[in-house]
Image (cartoon, rainbow, N blue to C red):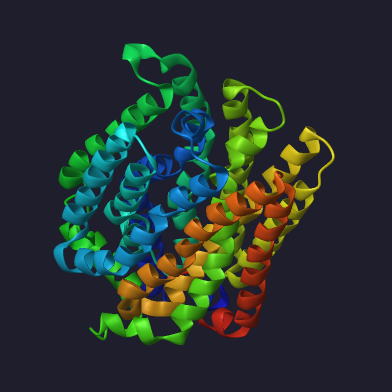
Amino acid sequence: MSDAAVAAPPKLRAHRIDADRVVAKAARRLIPFLVTGFIVAYLDRVNIGFAALTMNGELGFTPEFFGWGAGIFFVGYCLFEAPSNYIMHRVGARMWIARIMVSWGIVSALTAFIWNEASFVVLRLLLGVMEAGFAPGVILYLTYWIPAAQRARVLAGFLIAVPVSSAIGSPISGLILASMDGVGGISGWRWLFLMEALPSIVLGIVCFFYLPDGPESAKWLTSGEKASLRAAIESEAEPDHGDHWRALKDMRVLLIGVAYFGIVIALYGMSFWLPQIIKSFGFGVVATSVLASIPYVCSALAMWAWSRSSDRRRETVGHTALAAVVGAVGLACAAYAPTPLLSMIALSVAAIGAIAALPTFWSFATLALGAGDGVVGVAVINSIGNISGFAGPYLVGLIKGATGEFSDALLALALGPLITAFLLLRARRSANSKYPTRGA
C-alpha cells in the first residue's frame, strides 16, 4: 500500500477498497468474453500462416507475394481504426463490437473461396476493414472500467489472447489441415477458413445481448458500485475536452505509435512465418503445428507475470523497454542458431519479449493520453503500429525470396523492438511522473 493510501482518511480508504472490489467484479464479467473474442479475431487474422503450408503451392503463390498479400490486411485495418473507435464512442460498444465480429467472420469464411492472387488480396484487404477497431476499441472500452493502477494486469488478461490464440490455434489449424483435406472434394486450407470463421459470427451475436456499453448500463452493478467505480476513474482522468480528433496532431501520439510499430513488426513478422520457419527444419504439418504453439505458451505465462510486476511497481516504461530488448535478442539469436532446438528456444524468447511488452505498453499509452485524446489516439497508435503488420510479413517474404533463408529476415526484425526500447526510455521521466499509485 502506498504512503498516500496509508495517510488517507478512513472513509477514503474504504472507498478505494470498494473500488478495487468493483473493478475485480467487472473484470470477471468482461474479460473472459473479450478474451474469447480476441482469440477468435487473432486466429482469423493469422491462420493464413498455416493455410500457406498447402495453399501457396496449390495457388502458385511466391514467398514475396504471400508476404505482401498476407500483410495487405493491415492497410484496410489501419485506415479504418480511428473512425471505428470514434463511431464506437458515439453509438456504444455493444452494438459496434458486435458488428465488427459478425462482419469479419463473414469475410474470413469467404476467404475459403479464393482462386487467384487478386481474390486473395481483395479479401485480405476487406478482412482488415471489417476487423478494424476491435482491439483498440476494447482497449478504449476497458478504460471506462479500469483505473490506471490496475490496468496493466487487466489489459494482460485481455491481450493474453494473442499468445493463447496461437498456442491453441496452431494445433487446431494443423489438425484441420491434415484431417479435412479432400473432404467433400475441398482442400484442407479452405476448410480451415470456413471452420475457424464460424465462432466469430456466433460471438458477435452473443455480444449484442451480453456486453454493456459502460458501467452505467451494467445491470449487474448496484448504484453504489457504479458510483464507486465512477469516482475512481474520474479521480485520475483528465477531463474529456470533446475534441477527440485533435489526437491526430499530437506528437505524443506519433511517438508512441512509432514505438508500438517496433514491437508489432517483430510480432507479426514472426507470427505469419513461424509455421514455414519450423517446417523448414524438416517437420510435417502436424508436428509443425504442435511446435509452433510452444513459443506462445511460454509468452502467455511471461505476459501475465510481467504485467503483475508492472502494476506492483507502478511502472510501465522500463517494463516495456526491457521486454522489447528481450524480444530483439531472441530474434537475433534465432537468426543464426546452429540447430533446430536452439532455434526454437530463441524463437520462444523472441515471442516472450514481444508479447510481454504489450499490456505494459498499452497501460502506459492509455494513461499518457487521458480520456479525451484516448478515443482517437488509441486507434491512431494502434494504426501506426499495425502498419508493421504489413511491413513485417512483406519484409520477411522479400528477404526469404532473395536469399532462400530466414536468417537475415529475423535479424532485420530484431531492429524493431530495439527502436521501441530506445523511444520509451527517452520518455521514462515524464511517463513515470504521470503514473499514479494504486488507489490515487
Q: Is residue 364 visible?
A: yes
Residue 70 in percent (x, y) is at: 45, 48
Q: Residue at x 57, y 28 (%)?
A: 289
Residue 157 higher or lower than 109, as above or below: below
> In the rendered image, which quarter is residue 249 located in?
bottom left
- Nearer to me, 134 or 189: 189
Position of 259 relative to 388 (above/below): below
Q: Indicate the position of residue 217 as horizontal and vertical percent values.
A: 16, 58
Query: Which residue is at the far right?
Result: 338
Image position of 282 (left or right of 116): right
* Residue 221 to residue 60: above or below: below
Quarter of the image that includes the C terminus: bottom left
In which quadrant is the N terminus drawn? bottom right
Rendering coords of residue 7 (x, y %): 51, 79
- Using the image, determine if residue 334 lies above or below residue 134: above
Counting every numbered tag in the picture gives 0
Residue shown at 41% from the left, 62% from the top: 17
Does any portion of residue 356 appear in the rendered image? no
Residue found at x 36% / y 43%: 120
Quadrant of res 278: top right
| Left or right: where 91 falls relative to 138 | left
Task: Say which of 219 and 270 sits in front.
Answer: 270
Residue 223, x across and y down, in percent? 18, 61
Horizontal arrangement in the rendering, residue 418 relative to residue 317 (left or right): right
Q: Residue at x 27, y 66 (%)?
A: 85
